[in-house]
Amino acid sequence: RKRFRVQHLAEHKTAGRKLTMLTAYDTITGRIFDAAGVDMLLVGDSMGDNVLGYENTIPVTLDEMVLAARSVARAAKHSMVVADLPFGSYESSPQQAFASAVRMFKEAGVQAIKMEGGTRIAKHVELLTQSGIPVFGHLGFTPQSENMLGGKRIQGRGDEAAERLCEDALALQEAGAVAVVLEMVPAPVAARATEILRIPTIGIGAGSEVDGQVLVWTDMAGMGDWSPRFAKQFGQVGAALAGAAQAYVSEVQAQTFPAAEHQYEH
Ligand code: KIV
Ligand code: NA
């Protein structure tokens, strides 16, 4: 299997082959998902609420993202590694976005970055793209703007909002973005954006008529006690892990572990 690269995004869209993306925040999950055949690993700032114990993605720093991205990039042999630029590391200017993206490339070794926003970051996308940095856009519900959006709410509802979302998507494409993530968007609106774009759309809570899907891995694998409606649990890894830890505790206490085969001879 060859490494998934930027040209495969458009090729998949043209061929009607669905793209797959999962988040990963470390080498262990990066290795497993890479071997499982996932096209793209997203080192998402969802690490904030899913791994680091923060309330949301807003406190996540660029240093934290670089560390996680490096550990995922080292594990990925075939998957393309995409890293989020966290809140505060790109908004103020194209130059700020460039400096943050360069850190992701030089220190972490990712193959693309993702930023939230449409028209407002078109100039940022343009500079990065012209500098050789593939950019993924992110529209719909954008968690870094949760305070402005008034919580985790569906975006692009109603004709006007849908039109604005499509304009933002076109602005990203025009600026050189290689793909756009659509989060918590009504399925027909995501379908419409997918239809008008040359570049692929990757949906999360955006229905099936998009070019690919992305999920937060802890939701996908049933790691947490809560997951959003749009996330399906494809496994019960949290329960399996809890079971393993309980069995370990029991066996140490019962003195059945370690057994003879776990010991070294003199
Ligand atoms: O951080 C993240 O996991 C994301 C996905 C939800 C698209 O941005
Ligand atoms: Na994110």
Image (cartoon, rainbow, N blue to C red):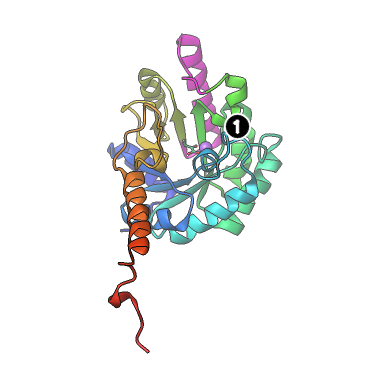
Q: Nearer the viewer, residue 222 or 87?
A: 222
Name the residue located 59 percent from the left edge and 38 percent from the top edge: 125
- In the rendered structure, the answer to whether residue 83 lies left or right of residue 124 reads left
Seen in the picture, residue 61 relative to 170 is either above or below; the reply is below
Query: Residue 88, position in %: x, y?
Result: 67, 37
Can residue 150 be seen in the rendering of this structure? yes
Locate residue 148: give its quadrant.
top right
Q: Is residue 160 magenta?
A: yes
Seen in the picture, residue 185 relative to 71 is either above or below; the reply is above
- The main secondary structure of the magenta stretch is helix
> Quadrant where the C terminus lies?
bottom left
- In the rendered structure, the answer to whether residue 242 lies left or right of residue 99 reads left
Name the residue located 70 percent from the left edge and 42 percent from the top edge: 96
Q: Is residue 53 magenta?
A: no
Q: Residue furthest top?
A: 159
Count of numbered circles on the image: 1
Name the residue located 31 percent from the left edge and 28 percent from the top edge: 208
Query: Residue 119, position in %: x, y?
Result: 59, 26
| Disc 1 target residue | 122
Dot 1: within a 10 Å radius of its alpha carbon, few (fewer than 14), some, or many (20 or more) residues?
Answer: many
> Quadrant where the N terminus lies?
bottom left
Q: Nearer the viewer, residue 260 or 126?
A: 260
Q: Amino acid at mark 1?
A: Ala
Q: Which residues are magenta?
A: 152-179
Q: Nearer the viewer, residue 188 or 11?
A: 188
Query: Residue 123, position in %: x, y?
Result: 64, 34
Can residue 38 be seen in the rendering of this structure? no
SS at badge 1: helix
Q: Residue furthest bottom?
A: 266
Query: Residue 197, position in %: x, y?
Result: 42, 29
